[in-house]
Image: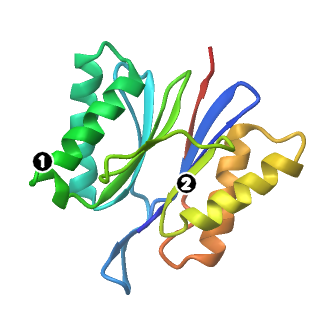
Amino acid sequence: MTTICSVKYNGRTAIAGDGQVTLGKSVIAKTTAKKIRRIYHDQVVIGFAGGVADAVSLQEMLEGKLESYSGDLRRAAVEMAQSWRKDPALQKLEAMVIAFNDQDLLLISGNGEVLEPDESVVAIGSGGYYAQAAAVGMLRHASGMTASEIAQEAVNIAADIDVFTDHEIVTDEIEEK
């Protein structure tokens, strides 16, 4: 698995994700995978957890929906989630996606859910709950940190606890309009 954490804070939305790819429950196959990508003319940032091939399929589907709806992330995410939930072939995909642009931060799941987080933090993957708890704590009590620093530190904390998360962390960030 992996840990991906996204934080919306002080006019910026950032995402951080580790690079570990695990085969089964005991073999680390790679430590430098890139699970965060920019799509739709570099206007949307996504992070994914789950099977790599499944995540690439979801990335392509989201890009297609973004093209169809002129970059409207909310609409594209809802349409993608509906397609994902209704199509028997897509239902077998085992991945989750965090997507954001300069306005929205969303979690998209195969259950047809498109969620905007209550506390401006969303995290997925095996260390997602650890990272989310850490990021919420930092948002509530930290001062002087950026959105990117909070997201990165949250994944670092998750990596200290979760064996399926490593410290090879990649971040990205977009300024809100």
User: Which residue is denoted by mark 1 in the rendering?
Assistant: 87
Q: Residues within 10 Å of mark 1 (few under 14, many from 20)?
A: few
CB within 8 Å, label 2 to label 1:
no
* Image quadrant assignment for residue 175: top right
The reply, left or right, for residue 51 in relation to residue 34 is left
Residue that carries the numbered disc 2 in the rendered image: 123
85 or 59, nearer to the observer: 85
Name the front one of labels 2 and 1. 1
Name which residue lies at 55% across and 68% down.
127
Q: Is residue 5 visible?
A: yes
Q: Is residue 78 left or right of residue 160?
A: left
For this view, does 34 lie left or right of residue 133? left
**Which quadrant of the view contains residue 66?**
top left
Q: Position of residue 5 (x, y in %)?
A: 57, 51
Amino acid type at mark 2? Ala
Residue sitting at 28 percent across and 51 percent down?
55
Estimate the x, y position of residue 1 in percent, counting from the top left.
Answer: 40, 68
Residue at the image point whose x is 25% and y is 26% from the top: 65
79 sits left or right of 143 in the view: left
Q: Which mark is residue 162?
A: none
Residue name at image x 38 percent, y 18 percent? 72
